[in-house]
Image (cartoon, rainbow, N blue to C red):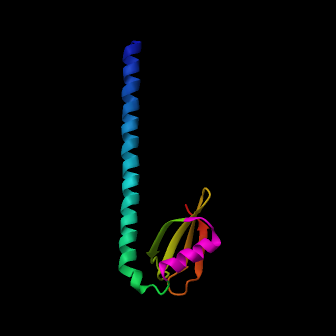
Amino acid sequence: MNWTMKRGAIVAGAAIVVAATAGFTYAAASDSSSEQSSEAAYTAAHRGEAAVPESAAVEAALSRHAGTPTDVHLQNEGDGLRWEVKPQSGTQVWEVQVDGQSGQVVSDQPDE
């Protein structure tokens, strides 16, 4: 096999890797967008059930971690209705869960 043939094989292989990686990136971005849409729909449907308004949940989270909230939504993962607030402080994003009835912070950890 001469150099031209080897170079062609390397370029073809690299193109396959790039195409495969690009497809994976698109799928991951698509999953994230789908998750955000689902979270927004859940929040819209259940906002009236929360005794604690979104603004109070954000305030509670920011009292723990000053910064900018990058995501706020309602969820119920078996522990009752909670606001999940993700404040970004510098390079660290935190996941703070605030009870939707009492306004108490029930979970505070680095976001994964």
- Give coordinates of residue 18: x percent, y percent: 40, 37
Q: Which residues are magenta?
A: 53-68
Residue at 59 percent of width and 77 percent of height: 60
Dividing the picture into quadrants, the one containing residue 58 is bottom right
Tell me: 51 left or right of 60: left
Can residue 15 be found in the magenta stretch?
A: no
Q: Is residue 28 above or below residue 39?
A: above
Dividing the picture into quadrants, the one containing residue 75 is bottom left
* Outermost residue to the top: 2
Quarter that holds the C terminus: bottom right
- Give coordinates of residue 4: x percent, y percent: 38, 14
- Give coordinates of residue 103: x percent, y percent: 55, 83
Which is nearer the eye, 39 or 20?
Answer: 39
Dividing the picture into quadrants, the one containing residue 106 is bottom right
Which is nearer the eye, 55 or 109?
Answer: 55
Can residue 66 be found in the magenta stretch?
A: yes
Tell me: 95 left or right of 10: right
Quarter that holds the N terminus: top left
Q: Is residue 12 above or below residue 103?
A: above
How many numbered callouts? 0
Residue at 63 percent of width and 67 percent of height: 66
Q: Main secondary structure of the magenta part?
A: helix
Residue at 48 percent of width and 78 percent of height: 54
Q: Is residue 82 above or below residue 72?
A: below
- Give coordinates of residue 13: x percent, y percent: 39, 30
Residue at 51 percent of width and 87 percent of height: 101
